[in-house]
Amino acid sequence: MSAELAGWRHAYSGKVRDLYVEDTVANLESAERVLMVASDRVSAFDHVLEPGIPGKGELLTTLSLWWFDQLDGIPNHLIADHELRGDTVTDLIPDAVAGRAMLARTLDMFPVECVVRGYLVGSGWLEYQESQSVCGIALPAGLRNGDRLPEPIYTPAFKAPMGEHDENISFERTIELVGADIAETLRSLSLRIFSRASAIAEARGVILADTKFEFGANRDTGVITLADEVLTSDSSRYWDVELYRVGGTNRLDSFDKQIVRNWLSEHWDKSGTPPTLPPEIVEQTAARYRELIDRLTRA
C-alpha cells in the first residue's frame, strides 16, 4: 500500500519501491523528477511476501546512497533533495518517508537488468551443471558451487513485468533490444562498477559475489546513467570473506534475503499464495541487512 504524500502523487509500484511524481505533472513520462520510496516489502521467487521486514526500506536507501557516493565519476540519477525558496532551504522529501526515499532524475530506462557475476552460485550454478556455461558464456570444467570465476562475467536479463520471471538473455539479444553501442556501454560500465565495488567491499571483509544494475538515458543529454538501487542487499549477493575462506556451506550464507528464500524452499512448493513468514525469519533477515551496512560503512 503506497502512502499519501502531500505535493506528490503515486505513479507506480514495483515489488519493493513506490514511485511518486509531483502533483503538478500528469504522469511519469512527463515528469522531470521522481520520488523513489523504498518500502519494507520483501519479495522472493517473484512474489511479494507477508509480512515485510521492518526498517528494510531505510536500510536499502542508506546503502544505495552510500554506494552512489563511492562511485564518483559514474553518472547516476540522484538530484538534490532540497532547494532554496526565497531565503529558505526547503526539504523536498516528505517527512513521512524521510530516510527511505531518494529524489531522482527521470530517465528513459533500458529494458535490461545488467547482471555481473564474480562467483558461480544461484541460477548460474544450476545452468553451469547442465551446460558448463552461464548465459552462453563457456566456463572451465570442474567448478564447484560458490567458486570464484576466472574473471567476472556479464549475464544480462530482460526485465519482465511484475509477477513474471526475468529472462536471462545473451549479449546478442541485448543488442537487438537496445542497439550495439548501448549494449556495449552497458556491459563495460557494469563490469567496471562491479570491479570497483568488489575491491571496496573486500577491503571491508565482504565479498561481492554478484549484483545487478539498471541504467537509463538522460532525457536531455542521452548520457547512460546508473539508476534505481545500487549494490544493496536486494540487488546483490554478499558473503563474509573469512567464512568463505574457511569453506563449507557457511561460505554461502549471504547478507541478504537468502534466509527468506531458504525458508520458502522448505515450506512452499512455489504454487499458489506463499505462506506468511514467521517472526524469527523476519528478524534474522533484518539483522543480516543491518550487519552488512555496518560492515561496509564503518570507518
Image (spheres, grey):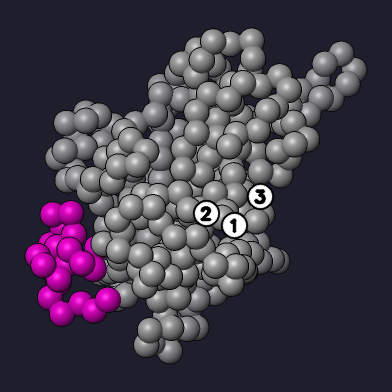
User: What span is in magenta?
Assistant: 124-145
Label 2: element kind: loop
Give the class, few, some or many, for how many residues have Cα within 10 Å of label 2's Cα (few <14, many ≥20): some
Asked if residue 83 lies in the magenta stretch, the reply is no
Q: Secondary structure under badge 3?
A: helix
Residue 108, x across and y down, in percent: 40, 24
The amino acid type, in three-letter code, at marker 2 is: Glu
Compared with residue 204, is residue 92 higher up or lower down, i.e. above or below?
above
Residue at image coords 73%, 40%: 98
**Residue 172: percent from left, percent from top:** 14, 40
User: Which residue occupies 47% across, 83% down?
Assistant: 243
**Mark 1 neighbour density, 10 Å: few (under 14) some (14–19) many (20 or more):** many
| 47 or 74: nearer the viewer | 47
- For the question of whether residue 15 can be seen, the reply is yes
Residue receiving disc 3: 58
Residue at mark 1:
53
In the image: residue 140, left or right of residue 24: left
Q: Amino acid at mark 3?
A: Glu
Q: How far apart are the alpha carbons under marks 1 and 2?
A: 9 Å
Q: CA distance from mark 3 to mark 2?
A: 18 Å
Please identify, in this view, whether the residue under mark 1 or under mark 2 is nearer the observer: 2
Query: Residue 154: horizontal and vertical position, in percent?
Result: 27, 52
Q: In the rendered view, would you say 184 is above or below 207?
A: above
